[in-house]
Amino acid sequence: MAGFSELIKTFEKTRDYIRDFFIYGCKARGEFVRKSSRTYDDEKRRAESWLGDVIRYDDSVHGRQVSISVDSGHIPENPLYQAYGAKSFTDNDIRLHFLLLDLLADGQPQNLRTLTDRLSNEYAAVFDEQTVRNKLREYAAEGLLIAEMQGKTAYYRIVPETVAKLLADCPGLDEAVRFYSEDEEFGVIGAQILRSTGLRNDIFYRKHHYIVHTLEDAVLPEFLAATAEKRRVCFRTISAKTQRRPDSEGGSFEVVPMQILASVQTGRRYLAAYIPEQKRFHAFRLDFIRNVKRSVPEPDYDKLAEAYRRNLAHVFGVSFGMRHDLGAVEPVRLTIALNEYTEGYIRERLEREKRIGVLEKSGEGLYTLTVDAFDPNEVMHWAKTLIGRIVSVEGGTRQMRGRFYYDICRMRDMYGGDADDTVS
């Protein structure tokens, strides 16, 4: 029977467990239904070995729940980056890694056949040419080696600039790496540079630091590359509502990626894309996307990109609603009361946060915000932050208005003392 190991084969599996159990799910052992209890124990132990300092345990009637508890504004380094350093390798991978780098350490370019012969003659390490070729190509793609063509033959040499040399030759570069080690686009790379050189980020802290974005860093480059190449992408999604079912595999999609959107309220990131099969735009949460693969080029990409830009004029948050094309959308009108002499900051906030809306003065101390959005529910989520100032809500859908008034009445009953209700 195989023993427990802290190392992992693929990051996708670890990403699922950290996301479901330690960030969003906070599940107890008995709530884990997708695989065996032993699998839960192994994955929990593996994550604890990386994240021990930020793990919290809560005991309830359902059992012990495990989650990550951290004030992201008070930590210098993202603890989730440790999961990227836990990948396992085969014995041959490790052996070939060090032997190839040793053979290329003199900086002289060498071709595949020469390297394969030297592995056999100097180290008694017999590898077939295809294995060595794959490793050389992998390292060239990773930037460890430089591949140069001489005629029809590829020659490889080691990159002469090392991290230690660059840091020594470029004053201030170490501080730049410290800063960008917690940046969303550079974070994983910056953290690995710091770790490899024995440095730590002891200078910069971020007040609003969404550390969970690192779980999306494995899929984000594929979407960015597909967008630059104007290609379709294929992926699977999981549903927040159905992921507890053992038979829940989510949906499969082939889409045309348009843009990465980020919520200023929750910090969540989304892929805005066109779904050819459904003939509409949609926003997918990045943390619920897996198995991303680039597909065929999209011949109508420029036309779809123009349609996407027109659609954005009717998107209040990230939702495109269920509409296939641009059409007449009944606007939502919010009338808001404020004291124009003492509450000018409220009007400034409305101007700042109205997004696609139009703000107009409609009376003494009254302002009307009109928003023509595909999904009026997104407008109402924001409007609830103005409770106590809303005079009326018009337009939108009947369901949206009914839900808003129901929520207001329930709050009145709970906090006004007119009904025997409890806060849930």
Image (cartoon, grey):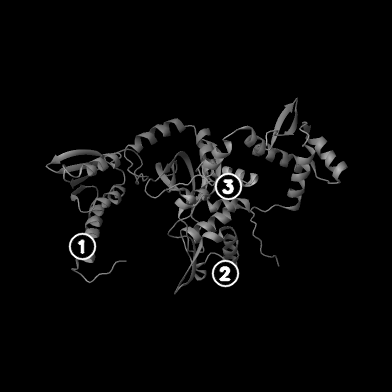
Image coords of residue 305 (percent x, y): 42, 33
Dot in front, 3 or 1: 3
At x 25%, y 54%, the residue is 399
Q: Which of marks 2 and 1 is in front?
A: 1
- Alpha-carbon distance for marks 3 and 2? 37 Å
Type of the residue with mark 1: Arg
The residue that disc 3 covers is: 200
Label 1: element kind: helix
Spot occupied by residue 96 in the image (x, y as percentages of width and height): 76, 45
Q: From the viewer's perspective, is the residue at label 3 or at label 2 nearer?
A: 3
How packed mark 3 is, by other alpha carbons closer than 10 Å (few <14, some 14-19, many 20 or more), is some
Q: Looking at the image, is mark 3 or mark 1 earlier in the sequence? A: 3
> Of 211 and 228, which appears nearest the observer?
211
Q: What residue type is labelled 3?
A: Arg
The disc, 3 or 2, on the residue closer to the chain's N-terminal end is 2
Mark number displayed over residue 37: 2
Q: Residue 213 location, x and y as percent? A: 49, 48
Residue 292: in sight, yes or no? yes
Direction from residue 218 to residue 98 in the image, left or right: right
Q: Left or right: 316 with respect to 49? A: left
At which x and y percent is residue 419? 20, 69
Q: Which labelled disc corresponds to residue 412?
A: 1
Q: Residue at x 57, y 42 (%)?
A: 190
Mark 2: which amino acid? Answer: Ser
Q: Distance between the residues labelled 3 and 1?
A: 51 Å
Label pair 2/1, CB-CB below 8 angstroms:
no
User: In the displayed structure, would residue 19 be above or below residue 296?
Assistant: below
Is residue 222 something that shows in the picture?
Answer: no
Q: In which quarter of the image is residue 169?
A: top right
